[in-house]
Amino acid sequence: MIIKRNEEECILYQRRKSMENITMYYKDCATCDHINSENVNQAALVEAEIDTQSHPRLVHTADGNKYFTSAKDASLIVLDIDLTDAGLYTCLVQGDSLLKNSTADLFVLLPPQCHNLIPSFTYHNGDVNQQTLFDCNVHYRGNKPPIILWKHDKQELNTGTDYHNNTFAMATLSFKPDKKYDGYRFLCLVEYPSAKFLTACQTKPPLQIYYPVHLNKMIIKPQADEYVYNSGKTINLDCQASGNPHPKYRWTFKPKGDNSAETILATEPRYTITDADKRNEGTYNCTVTNNINGTLFIDTQTKYIKINDENSSDGEYRFVIIQSSQEDNTTPNPTTSAVSPYAIGAVICAVLAVILILVFVILGMKFRDQCFLMQMRDKRTHTRLTRDHDENMDDQEIELLDESVQSSVRTDEPQYGRLKLYWEIPRKDIRLVEEIAAGSFVEVWKGKMKKYPNSSEIQKVAIKKLIENATEQERKFFLGEMEVQKMLQPHPNVILLIGCYTFHEPWLLMLEYAQEGTLYEYLQYSRPGAQTVQISSNSVHHKNINSHRLLAIAAQVVNGLMHLQKFKLIYYRLKTSNILVGRGGICKLTGFGFPHEITERNQYENDTLPVECMSPESLKEQIYNYRTDIWSYGVLLWEIIHFGLSPYLNLEREEIEDDILYQLMLECWQEDPMKRKEYPDILQVLSNMAADHSLHILLDSLPDTCKFTQAV
Ligand SMILES: Nc1ncnc2c1ncn2[C@@H]1O[C@H](COP(=O)(O)OP(=O)(O)OP(=O)(O)O)[C@@H](O)[C@H]1O
Ligand SMILES: [Mg+2]
């Protein structure tokens, strides 16, 4: 690296890494005549001389190991420059018996350091009630101090600079951030004014301002009056939202006149309706969510899109109406005016009757045509989809398809056919990777699938594959589970159905992948060992999982149960091994159903019923409802705070009578179902406990009776 002496006789050097050398040229040295010996500060004095060819040459250096001169180009080389090399360098030039002095001021600056002391803020009720704290500091050595400037884009941000011992400068950038600062990175510039020399550092990571999601706009293109489109159109639906963490998008659809079914269309900001037809008519809803410190924020907007079926169009149908009105206008015919008013009336009635009959006949024909056309279209779509599903199978998919079963493809399943077009995922977009578990009649696979049609984005999924040779009843259960999942709105504490494949066997259900496995496993491996669990003011923290984490798990399960209750669903097999845990330890409910379907399923699974979790009325009278779930929840709560131990039914109650959690369990275990605590009240108790930082679950000793890890 070469730095030339500049006009102001200053040399500025930023040390970048060790062992860097600089070379100072003394070419112009002879023209310099200014010297201020008082400014000399740790300078290395050098001398130069004009040689016989009138060429300046350095003749002496202060330290042979550090400073070198080169006879050829009259330069001074400084090796491995550091802060102590700063100072005034002088050269002596001699020529024609004239001696001239010149100085060069070397200023050394270490690279500045930027620190982001508070990297994230949460925006609440339109405000962030804390100040940022960015630090920029620099070590330097030289006659003049550097100036530190904070900048964002081109805007200068005012801060003062503090100097210490003439060797250290620091500027702190502190302000109350706003939502707009989300993602900002600030630049700290260090300037040595007279040298116009700049060095800089940038804050990292970017400033995070967490703020709730807001759905700014729902845009439908092409634009149309009142969102009425002709069939065959391609319609783009865009959802524009802001929020940090980045919003998650979900497009759902409710067909016209069908309030039961809501279908998830996409989980991207854009959903495209291609080749629109009457079946695409309905309510489109975009829901955006983001989660800030465990609180879920939701915003949503809805639009109704109407599709004009081209075949019912305009031309023919209107023609009939125009005809009829023409008839009306021509009724007062002069040739009939002499006839009695009764006769005229009778004729008019007759004409109207004929017109009406004509209208009905034409409409009837038209309706038949339409049905025919719709049938044709359905057939075409089905053939296209079936082709889609058959083609491009990779080796693995071909392996999975049993040729003999393929021939008996089910094309007529009215109860599921309605939804098929929206939920069915082409088989070529699904890949089964590894079998992870076996359920009663399913194999559970870890798999991958495309995020949306024709996308290159891949997502991890759990795939439930119906076993070969499944009985009719098992098929029914499989499809039943699928149907329940389809009608359920997404919820962070309920496992999400992504899609299905039921065109050929084996049938597949694609679900959100819960990477931590079951809650039972999760609690087991987070378990600190033998322990008793109590709420008390003596806090004992555990390195893996603490009391607040356990309370959060308990609260997430209640949240999920409340969501199921909205859809009149019950859990009925509530226990830790039937709850899944996703990324970040978020609990996800799975395997629920409608009360009336449960009796049959229970008979089928009679020997695996979690009797230890079941309410007295479920055990005695096979009654299942959300109040029996509350009983099971009490047992689950016990399991949670005992890290997945098998429910300990002979609990020594007096030992923990004052315990808030134990009281909560007792309120779930009321013999009279009507007296059991309701979900919102349970949630309230748990959040009060979580807010009270003096309460902790004691995790240090466990009664002997609990010292086993086997779950039933
Ligand atoms: N979405 C998922 N993500 C990760 N693992 C899953 C997922 N779904 C299921 N599993 C794994 O597969 C196992 C069986 O799944 P599940 O309990 O849903 O099936 P099941 O038909 O209800 O069987 P069971 O008779 O065991 O209740 C689970 O215990 C879990 O280990
Ligand atoms: Mg299960």
Image: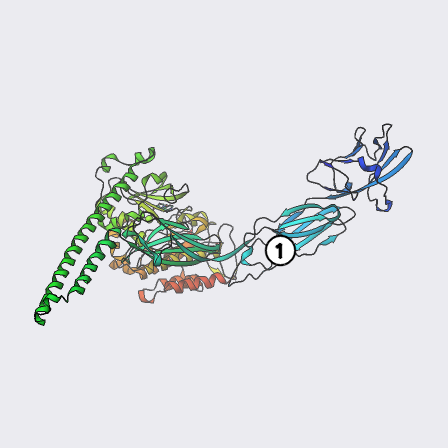
Q: Which residue is mark 1?
A: 133
Q: Position of residue 639 (x, y in %)?
A: 40, 54
Residue situated in front as seen by the camera: 547 or 39:
39
Amino acid under disc 1: Leu
Colour scheme of this structure image? Answer: rainbow
**Residue count near mark 1 (Cα–Cα under 10 Å), binned few <14, some 14–19, many ≥20:** some
Location of residue 424 by image quarter: top left
Q: Position of residue 648 (x, y in %)?
A: 38, 55
Left or right of 339, for residue 591: right
Q: Position of residue 434 (x, y in %)?
A: 37, 38
Where 134 sits versus 406, above or below?
A: below
Q: Position of residue 322 (x, y in %)?
A: 21, 59
Residue situated in front as seen by the camera: 227 or 34:
227
Q: Can residue 159 be seen?
A: yes
Residue situated in front as seen by the camera: 600 or 365:
365
Location of residue 129 by image quarter: bottom right
Left or right of 18, for residue 578: left
Residue situated in front as seen by the camera: 356 or 141:
356
Total marks in image: 1
